Image (cartoon, grey):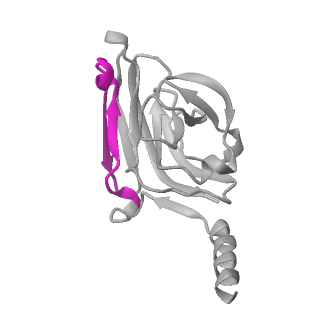
Amino acid sequence: MKQIWGIGIWIVIMGFIPMTFDFGTKNSAASRDWRVINDGVMGGSSQGRALLTEESILFEGEISLENNGGFSSLKSPFTSYDLSGKKYLKIRYRGSGQPMAFTLETNRRWYRPYFKKRLSSTSGQWVEERIELQDFEAYRIGSRLKQTLTEDFLEQIIRIGFISDGKQAGPFRFEVDYIIFE
């Protein structure tokens, strides 16, 4: 019986502990193994690259609409990012050139639904934004679905990331200092 109470208390406490990805710490686990996925996987010719700076992860490149292209994304490694009990995403970032969105994925297959929230334009200035997780909307291959991010989906998150999918040709620059789920 004591074990059951202990497990229950641990689960409640874990829901209140923020999950943090601090890219300003070069050697942090948050900085490792993120990868760029461009529209070349579908025949497009957009280019993106990521590099670590002293205070952030920098994601930059050029969006091309040739060959039905139009996106570049930066993705975390696949793992369990159980966000049960979390209500908000807090992120410090700056960007210019292209609209950017934050993504939450529950499936490894690219054609399966995922959740997305567009981020505010910053004109190159650092901003800290706090977003309610319930404001994320489901998408499949760029089309919005009538589905919201529920607690069931929050515990199934296996990948987080960013995508520039505004279908606007041109350069982009997007920099992230930290991500906190609270």
Q: In this view of the protein, which residue sits in the foreground, 48 or 173?
A: 48
Give left or right: position of 76 versus 138: left
Q: Residue at x 70, y 87 (%)?
A: 1
What percent of the width, then of the height, locates residue 133? 67, 46
Q: Which quarter of the rendering shows the C terminus? A: bottom right
Q: Residue at x 60, y 65 (%)?
A: 18
Q: Is residue 29 above or below residue 40?
A: below
Q: Is residue 107 above or below residue 144?
A: below
User: Is residue 42 one of those drawn in magenta?
Assistant: yes
Q: Which residues are magenta?
A: 30-53
User: Is residue 144 one of those drawn in magenta?
Assistant: no
In this view of the protein, can residue 122 be seen by the observer? no
Q: Is residue 95 above or below residue 158?
A: above
Give left or right: position of 142 versus 7: left
In this view of the protein, can residue 22 be seen by the observer? yes
What percent of the width, then of the height, locates residue 100? 51, 32
Q: Residue at x 30, y 26 (%)?
A: 41
Question: Residue 30, located in which quarter of the rendered image?
Answer: bottom left
Q: Residue at x 57, y 50 (%)?
A: 91
Instruction: Find the residue positioned furthest to the top.
Output: 67
Give left or right: position of 149 versus 72: right
Question: Residue 69, located in which quarter of the rendered image?
Answer: top left
Q: In this view of the protein, which residue sits in the foreground, 63 or 142?
A: 142
Instruction: Find the residue positioned furthest to the bottom.
Output: 2
What percent of the width, then of the height, locates residue 168? 46, 17
What percent of the width, then of the height, locates residue 84? 64, 58
